[in-house]
Amino acid sequence: MNKLFFSGKMLYRILKNSNKLKEIEKRLKVKIESRGKGGVIVKSLKNDSVAEYNASRILEAFALGFEIKAALQLEDVDYSFVKINVRDFVRGSRIGSAVGRVIGKEGRTKQVIEELSGCSIVVSDHAVAVIGRSENAETAANALISLIRGSKQANIYKFLEKSRARLRELEEENIEKFIEKEKPKGQSKKAEKKAKKG
């Protein structure tokens, strides 16, 4: 059993969307109950601590403002949820401007970071949260922290573009290694070339 606590606004978002709660409960086979003063209990119907943990992360992501579809990605072990507390990186008087930098003019900065990182991003009063494939979420979180600390948007975009290119290279290398590993034993390079020509 996991017990979570949410602020009034976050708890309201959870409780007003009972159909989304039922979707989480059904999919992960858990029971979610409100327990006064911002408390929420998540219990597995099958005594499955992994399901409780996943449901808790999904619930927290949903409460922060992620769409349920994005939050449910956290069921997959390849996806990560990173929450950045802006207060950890800037003083109280600069929180508003730091959050504004993350959002950008008409939401453009946030949108570009989402596109370059392949992640979903939500910005609240003093927190920024990321959901995406683990490598991408970590990269996006590092970029967002740099942006919160005052780095220029252009530098953040360059960093993300380089990171995306490097991840593509790694994926291609992994595919090549997999193909090499799956080749029938004893097949020579000459036989390979013949097969390609023929």
Image (cartoon, rainbow, N blue to C red):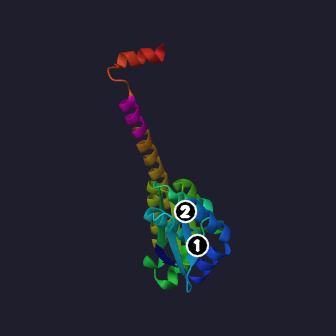
Q: Is residue 189 left or right of residue 8?
A: left
Residue at left offset 48%, top offset 69%: 83
Q: Is residue 153 left or right of residue 179?
A: right
Secondary element under disc 2, as helix, strand or loop, is loop
Amino acid type at image mark 1: Ala
Cα distance in 3D space between marks 1 and 2: 19 Å
| Image x and y of residue 126, in percent | 53, 78
Name the outermost residue toward the left.
Answer: 186
Question: Which residue in the structure is indicated by mark 1?
Answer: 63
Q: Which disc is residue 122 wearing? A: none
Verify whether residue 180 appears in magenta: yes
Image height of 174 relative to 41, above or below: above
Name the outermost residue toward the front.
Answer: 46
Q: Give the mark toward the camera: 1 or 2.
A: 2
Region rendered in magenta: 174-182
Q: Which of these two is toward me, 149 or 76?
A: 76
Name the outermost residue toward the bottom.
Answer: 37
Q: Which disc is residue 29 wearing? A: 2
| Prevalent SS, magenta region | helix
Residue 68, picture quadrant: bottom right
Alpha-carbon neighbours of circle 2 within 10 Å: few (<14), some, or many (≥20)?
A: some
Verify whether residue 19 appears in magenta: no
Alpha-carbon neighbours of circle 1 within 10 Å: few (<14), some, or many (≥20)?
A: many
Amino acid type at image mark 2: Lys
Secondary element under disc 1, as helix, strand or loop, is helix
